[in-house]
Amino acid sequence: MPEKTVTVKDLVDNTRLTIVAGHKHLDRVITTADISRPGLEMTGYFTYYAPERVQLLGITETSFSKRMGHDELLMVYRKMADEQTPAFVVSTDLPIAEELKQAAEEAGIPILTSKLTSSQILSNMTYYLGGELAPRQSVHGVLIDVHGLGVLITGDAGIGKTESALELIQQGKARLVADDRVDIHQEDEQRLIGQPSKVLQNLMEVRGVGIIDVQQVYGAVSVRSHASIMVNIHLSNGKIGEQNFDRLGNEDDYIDILGVKIKKMVVPVTPGRNTASVIDAAAVKFRTKNMGYDALATLEKRMNEAILENEAADQKEESSHD
């Protein structure tokens, strides 16, 4: 899917920022989620300056600037006001230097302020920009929230992904995030966030029925705007008992999305099998295992104990015969 772009106006609309100057230049594009704190630049050191970043000025930077003369400060701000610089952000409602206003106006760069501290506004901007500018991938499938667990359902066409998800939603066990197309972006090194496209939000296509609006039919509690993808349940037309299906579950099966490995469970779909219930059980199994309980390990432990008991009984019987 195409790379998503973010403008300064988007940043203002989605974080707690106020426009002080440069209203006509809010269409400037932000290309990175990294935020710059230009401490060294205030001293005139620009060797490693990153002009493409939003420039955040806090108490440290503004306090240092008060020690500088007008010409020196104007020169520094003019160097910072690069053609790539999206915006200047001043935290904690600090007064804005006239030199900064002049340099920003000359370069057509907006100046934004916030009542929040530098750490708070830095966190807000990084979180928003990180989500919007992260690499994205679209996956054909259904994403639902099952008991607070993001479950990505994939499988062969017409196998019943949507119908199984709808049954869980009707039972109140799941909430719809996305149907048919799941837009995925990486929030951090180990976490993927899935959400619907704007066109398909809250909508499901049920074969033979058509399009239904899940929120309108089942209420606001039946949908979510996004979810962290924790497990992939892949529905397959294979038959139970065939060699490609492990009856005890393949603990080492994963899918790779944007470099992040997600646990994968392959579920065979056969006539008379309630796929929705199997998906629910698989989600519960995954959650309980993450909480420290492993049913397979419990089975293995009981089997080993039974074997030891049988061996002890056999030895005792042999001893009695002797």
Image (cartoon, grey):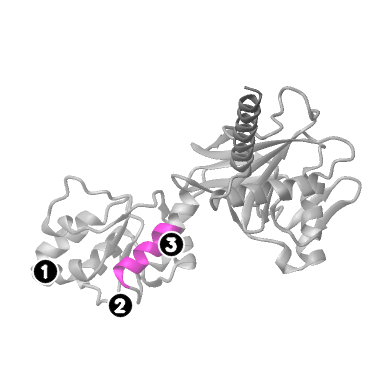
Give, as a three-letter code, the residue at label 1: His
Q: CA distance from mark 1 to mark 3?
A: 27 Å
Instruction: Choose mark 2 or mark 1, whichever is in front.
Output: 2
Residue 238 lies left or right of residue 3; in this view the side is right
Whether residue 63 is visible to the viewer of this picture, yes or no, is yes
Q: Earlier in the sequence, mark 1 or mark 3?
A: 3
The residue that appears at 78% across and 60% down in the rendered structure is 214
- The residue identified by callout 1 is 70
Q: In the picture, residue 305 is in which quadrant?
A: top right
Circle on res. 26: 3
Task: Please give the name of the residue rendered at 76% of the width and 62% of the height, measured from the top-left corner.
Answer: 172
- Magenta segment: does it hold 123? yes
Q: Which residue is at a point 25% across and 68% down the rendered structure image?
A: 58
Please indicate whether residue 189 sits to the left or right of residue 35 in the image: right
Instruction: Give residue 246's position: percent from left, percent from top.
Output: 69, 29
Q: Which x, y percent locates residue 215?
A: 76, 64
Q: Quadrant of residue 255?
A: top right
Give percent across and percent down for residue 256. Answer: 55, 35
Q: Amino acid at mark 3?
A: Leu
**Mark 1: secondary structure:** helix
What secondary structure prevails in the magenta region?
Answer: helix
Residue picked out by circle 2? 93
Q: Check disc 3 and report its element: helix, strand or loop.
A: loop
Question: Does residue 89 lie above or below 133 as drawn?
Answer: below
How far apart are labels 2 and 1 at the CA level? 22 Å
Q: Is residue 277 left or right of residue 287?
A: right
For discs 2 and 3, the disc positioned in front in the rendered view: 2
Q: Earlier in the sequence, mark 2 or mark 1?
A: 1
Q: Which residue is at a point 27% across and 48% down the rendered structure image?
A: 50
Which secondary structure, mark 2?
loop
- Residue 124 shown left or right of residue 285 in the figure: left
Magenta segment boundaries in residue numbering = 117-127
